[in-house]
Amino acid sequence: MLDVAMTATKRPEVLEETLRSFGHNMFAGLSCRLIMNIDPVGKPDVSVEHIVATANACGFDNVITHSPPVASFPKAFKWVLLCSESDFVFYLEDDWKLTRPVALPHLIRLMKDFPKLASIRLAAFHANPDNMKNWNKFFPYDPGTGLYLCPEELRLGVGFCGHPCLIRGEFIDRTVPHLDVRKNPEKQFHNGGPKPITDEVVKWDYGVYSKPSSPPLVVDIGRKWMVKNKFRKAGNKAFFVNWERDE
């Protein structure tokens, strides 16, 4: 069984689009357990039971939830990953849409065949024949793995991020317990993060999966909802910890 670790909020229409896209294009026919932290952000009249029912309707029957009284993205991130038990864990936030089929067993096989891979994330950027631009950095295409691999010197900058990704359980065990829940979790895998985490990060490879000469595999569908419902990430978006709403 594969654990799917998800940070979620109370916006069932966004969650449904996310889970249906991944359920159809990636998880169909596979045994998955959905681990969801449901933060009290979004529609106030939406219950936790409503969110679980939405997941059930999208084909996820085995659902474990946590619904804290106060929202915190760092605590949500840490909780869902620490609850995972499978050798490989798929991390998924509730506002990403998978645009076309991806063979998850193939990604798992790559992780097994290449034991230095800490994670394989799905491309959120266009894939060129020889490289892929991730933000302002370039990852070369590696024909041996069929992945775009993060250069060694960039591991502490853009190696690990919160895009939908398959993560090795061993990597989770060695890093996530050291996360500071007062700070953005993704940034703690980068330069300036806790030494137990950054010391571990530099030991591993990080791949991005896409077919060469292809558009992004995943697209962010949450921003439009946030604008429509007057939510925004508080403070510096790059160091996101919590939400706030414009009155």
Image: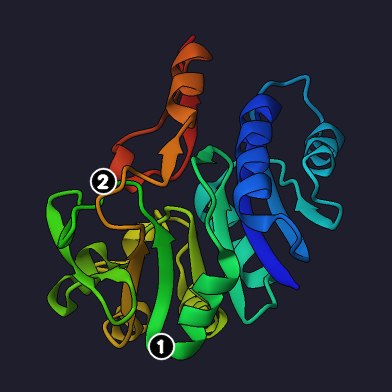
Q: Is residue 247 above or below residue 154?
A: above
- Residue at image mark 1: 114
Please rate how many residues cluster around mark 1, counting C-alpha atoms within 10 Å: few if below 14, some from 14 to 19, many from 20: few
Q: Is residue 158 above or below residue 70?
A: below
Residue in the image at 66% along x and 42% along y: 19
Q: Point out residue 80 in the picture as x, y percentages from the top left corner.
A: 64, 61
Q: Is residue 56 left or right of residue 167?
A: right
Q: Is residue 72 above or below residue 90?
A: above
Residue 155 seen in the figure: yes
View extreme (top): residue:
247
Q: Amino acid at mark 2?
A: His
User: If you read the primary sequence from the N terminus, does the residue marked by circle 2 or circle 1 appear first?
Assistant: 1
Q: Is residue 140 left or right of residue 88?
A: left
Q: Nearer the viewer, residue 144 or 33?
A: 144
Q: Amino acid at mark 1?
A: Phe
Residue 174 seen in the figure: no
Q: Nearer the viewer, residue 214 or 199?
A: 214
Q: Point out residue 219 in the picture as x, y percentages from the top left corner.
A: 42, 38
- Quarter location, residue 190: bottom left
**Secondary element at tag 1:** loop
Picture colour scheme: rainbow
- Quarter location, residue 162: bottom left
**Secondary element at tag 2:** loop
Q: Is residue 99 left or right of residue 5?
A: left
Q: Point out residue 54 in the picture as x, y percentages from the top left corner.
A: 79, 35
- Residue at image mark 2: 126
Distance CA(mark 2)–CA(mark 1): 24 Å
Q: Is residue 77 left or right of residue 186?
A: right
Q: Quadrant of the N terminus?
A: bottom right
Residue in the image at 39% along x and 32% along y: 234
